[in-house]
Image: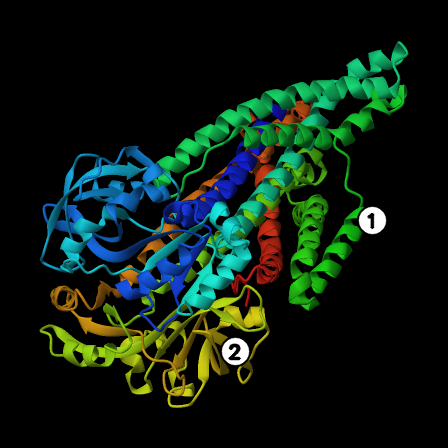
Amino acid sequence: MIVLAVAIAVATFTSALALRSSVRDTAIASYRALSGECELEATLSEEYSTYYLTADSGMYRTLETHAEKYGALHAGYDFFASVGTKGQGAFAEVYATDLSELAAYNAVTFLSGGYSGQTTGIVLSDTFAEKIGAQVNDYLYVSRYGSGSKLPVKVEGIAATSGVFRQVDALLAEEGASRILSLGDIKVYNRFFIDLSEQKMSSLGVDEAEAQALIEDANPLFILASPVAEGEVQVTLSYQSTLLFVIAVIAAALGAILIYTSVSLLMKNRVATASLFKSVGATSGALSLYLLAEVLLYAMVGALVGLGAGYGVQALFGYLTGTVVTFSLGWLTALVGVLFGVALALLSALLPVLRLSHSPLYDMLHEASPVRPVRSLPASLCGALFLALFVAVALVGTEQAFLVGAFAFFALLFSLFTLVPLAIKGVATLVSLLTKDRPAAGKLYLAAAGARHDRHVHSGARLLAISVMAVISVGVLIGEANHQLSSFDKLFRAEIMISASSDSLPSLAEEAQEVEGVSGAYLAYVANRSSIVGNKDNTVSLFAAYGQQYDKVFNAEELGVDVASFVGSERKAAIGGGLALKLGLEVGDTFTVELEDRKVDFVIASLIDTPLTVVFTDLYGLGLAPNVCLADGTEEARFRLAEKYALDGTVITSSEAFGYVTDLAVAYMKVFTLFEVLVWLFAFAGYINAAIAAYRDRKRERELLVAAGASKRDIRLITLAENALVVLSSLLLGAVFSVALLYIVQNMLKTLGLYFTLIG
């Protein structure tokens, strides 16, 4: 059982560690996928569309003139396209650049096959290739999304696995892209990467910071920043990392309890050996080393088995999620996993080993049970400590919530560990009193008496209680995450999103209403990841439309927004309830959002009953121009709009704007659900181990019952009733404690900018 416990613990821990590391690494790789080794990315700061930034040739040449003094400039552009076979295309984001410059981008280095340089060739990301069933050397049709003009292209390569955060679905030479866009010789760029040269900068007597400042001064329309947005990666990963960290801690806690119980049972079998060693003069220290060496042997075997299971989990993840979520166990993770398993086993075994090795010889010969009873005083102290820290979690400020919450979490585990036997004793005592002197309930009385005194099953019950607390809590977290992510699909009432320059949007909205199949077109403002002033690392998505059009644009009321409270009033807004919880805001309070380098104040008119990190407001008084047109219409209407505005902007369905988010959510839910199964496996194995040990040690008790007239059926019923009483009591206690754990986690998540209202 020690081997099994260590194996499960190592498999769970290494899988969580590898997945957490892989998600971060692949997120960083995605930012590097297009930028190569370039230090800077130049982004237009003008009021262009949220989804379609464009620079003309003059802008590019101006940037090139100044940037190439200090290094090389790589340029290209993104556009949305339909890519697939036999004219049945799938929505994709395509990146295009000069053929001679294509090799400068990292995505090409990820290829399986190689890029031969055909002007009509295309490189697909692995996830997109799997989605449409494409392979190297296949021929596909590509068109500007929704346009009827198609171009056959050959799949020159498929990018190797680099994670779920790929920025593009396909790479295309500019000649082919220009034909698709029908732009002829006109080059339209919207992505620029600057590769600074040490040699050029040294010859001009400037360092990297000075070169960046000089380029910015010469090109005020562009914002220069690192293409690897570490801050955005951390925001993206914080929730997944927190869940994985919690799962790893739970795995360690359950493993420690299971190993402790197993070693305690093992020490009972070693009492005779320990007595013999003591009788011939062995010291307590020498005996401890001997017993720990035996545990170390089991731990090493279990750790190696656990690593093998970790690779099995890796394969299972791949089966469940395809290429959406990928991770691998590197040698460093494997080494950390082995050390974790060995350390966990030795630390968990230390107490029962020392207890046996330091016992007097006479006590060894009369050892009744290796499992010690829980004393009321330590249990009370643990409970009091937990209550104190739990209250502190509710009262402490946001900055200290994570640290205090971590201590409260461990206090909760210790409290549950000590309270489970006492709770079972209390329930069993109550059942004994109710069935005492009742012949018809004699079997139940015997079962309750056994449950009250059996320390072995009490140890197994601890595992069940902690596991049900963990499974319920993680389940609620997964459900809440799914609710938040899937809510993006419900933001827009209109089915079609048209993205174009702000200058052309008003006339475009009027023209769109005349297109066959379109019932209405409305101007709106959509901003993603706008910073909240004064709250570091906190961002929101902002959605605004004119008051009289609001109900036709957003599903705001379905998300709990009181539209009437802010429509027609300047600078009033509805804010997500979870976000307000994090920021400590209420209705009537003021908060500031930075929009397009402007600080805009809002007064909270209503709270949204959702964890969404969004702000709804009226476009009147906002002082910002609309950046999208949202239209109601059929699929045929969307196709007509896409063809009509193929050169003016981008036309997609509203669900496609956030569809990748929900796909990612489904993949992660599968992953975390699998972790929950591993936690249940821990609990099941531990309880069965304890129950078998109890059944074996109470052989004399069963023989006495048989001698008194009990049948084998009676023995089975008593055993089942006893275990049912223990299991139900522990599961109920774990469920009650899960509420406390969720409250603690909810407050801990505040510090990470994660806005979940798990309780309340």
Q: Could you say which quadrant of the image residue 590 lies in?
A: bottom right
Residue 430 relative to residue 48: left or right: right
Q: Residue at x 11, y 67 (%)?
A: 640
Give the SS element for disc 1.
helix
Q: Which residue in the structure is indicated by mark 2?
A: 592
Residue 172 relative to residue 675: left or right: left
Image quadrant occupied by the C terminus: bottom right
Give the SS element for disc 2.
strand
Q: Which residue in the structure is indicated by mark 1?
A: 377
Q: Which of these two is toward me, 607 or 615?
A: 615
* Residue 79 x/y as whole percent: 25, 58
Q: Residue furthest top?
A: 280
Q: Amino acid at mark 2?
A: Thr
Q: Residues within 10 Å of mark 1 (few under 14, many from 20)?
A: few
Q: Amino acid at mark 1?
A: Leu
Q: Which of these two is toward me, 119 or 668?
A: 119
Residue 426 relative to residue 476: left or right: right
Q: Which of these two is toward me, 374 or 58?
A: 58
Q: Which of these two is toward me, 446 or 215?
A: 215
Q: How is the image coloured?
A: rainbow
Q: Is residue 610 above or below residue 418?
A: below
